[in-house]
Image (cartoon, grey):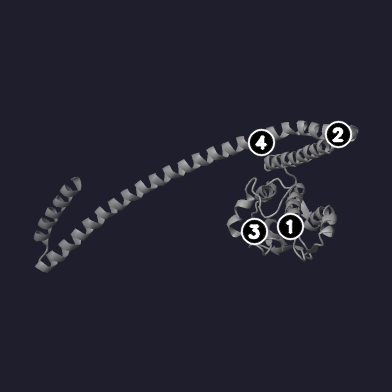
Amino acid sequence: MVVAVFLSGFLIFSHIFLRLYVLTVNDYLRALMLMFVAVVVVLLSEKIAKAEEELRKAYDALEQRVEERTAELVKVNDELDNYVHVVSHDLQTPITYIQGFSSLLLEKYQENLNDEGRTCLERIKASASRMEALVSDLLSLSRIGKVVSTFEEVPVSEIIENVTSGLQERLRRNGIQFVVAEHIPSIYCDRKTIYQVFENLLVNAVKFSAGTKTPKIEIGYRNGEDLHQFYVKDNGIGIDPEHHHKIFEKFERLKEIADEEGTGLGLAIVKRIVNNHGGRVWVESEKGHGATFHFTLPKAS
């Protein structure tokens, strides 16, 4: 309403002014058209400014909601990690007792047990060992990013050598060819946790390539600007692309093989450690054609 009154008044004033001071009809019409265009531009500018202001307010409100939800999610995740840490820590003692007493029964009272009794105790020991591994992985996962890490320049070749020294028997027993690229660089990292990254990836590679005719595992790298890109490659059973993202989640496991030693946390731990170093991890694979796990880590200064 206010705009209509203003526009009407402006046009009347313009009409009187132009009739008094413009000499020809053509000049009058041309000037009147320019005046009209100027009024339209002003009105459109006001509408655009108003729309931009409303859009800015909506964006600010949305951004605030996102920040609030993000803060809530971070709080929930922290509480969950703290809960997992406490529960896992408290489970260590009873698991130790279960393992200790079952071993004692097998050692001292084996003659008094029949085959069924010994089998039951062996299963109890095996289950306790699996529970111990699960608790250990849960504790490792909950500590990443919360325990102060010691970052230093570390030759990756040393980490690979230390990891593979504990896997030599499995590599030999499964006839796996193991290849490491030359001139593997140094990185700036927490040695202990990056050891765990290579260990988890190599254990998986051994596990999933052991059944192939000519199993092979390869470790290599590509040079980047700020980060080195490493990879662990095998020619094992491979992973269907639809599972590529799921395998990095907690308790996700491939169903293709009977995995008695895994906890379903190995790749989740790898992802959290790599992310904590400012890198990322992903997999390239197709079912039946092996898998290549890539991950980036900071260069040594």
Query: For the residue labelled by badge 2, is the local secondary structure a helix, a strand or a loop?
Result: loop
The residue wearing badge 2 is 113
CA distance for labels 2 and 1: 40 Å
Provide the secondary structure element on which disc 1 rests: helix
Q: Which residue is more in the foreground, 166 or 193?
A: 166
Residue 77: give x, y in percent of width and height: 59, 39
- Mark toward the start of the polypeptide (1 vs 4): 4
Marks 1/3: CA–CA distance: 12 Å
Task: Name the residue located 13 percent from the left edge and 65 percent from the top edge.
Answer: 29
- 130 left or right of 169 in image: left
Residue 84: image tag = 4
Amino acid type, residue under disc 4 in the picture:
Val
Q: Which residue is mark 3?
A: 239
N-term-proximal mark, 1 vs 3: 1
Q: Label 3 to label 2, Cα distance in Å? A: 44 Å
For the N terminus, the image quarter is top left
Marks 3 and 4, Cα distance to the nearest angstrom? 29 Å
Q: Residue 248, percent across and down?
A: 64, 50
Q: Is residue 65 above or below residue 271?
A: above
Marks 1,4: beta carbons within 8 A: no
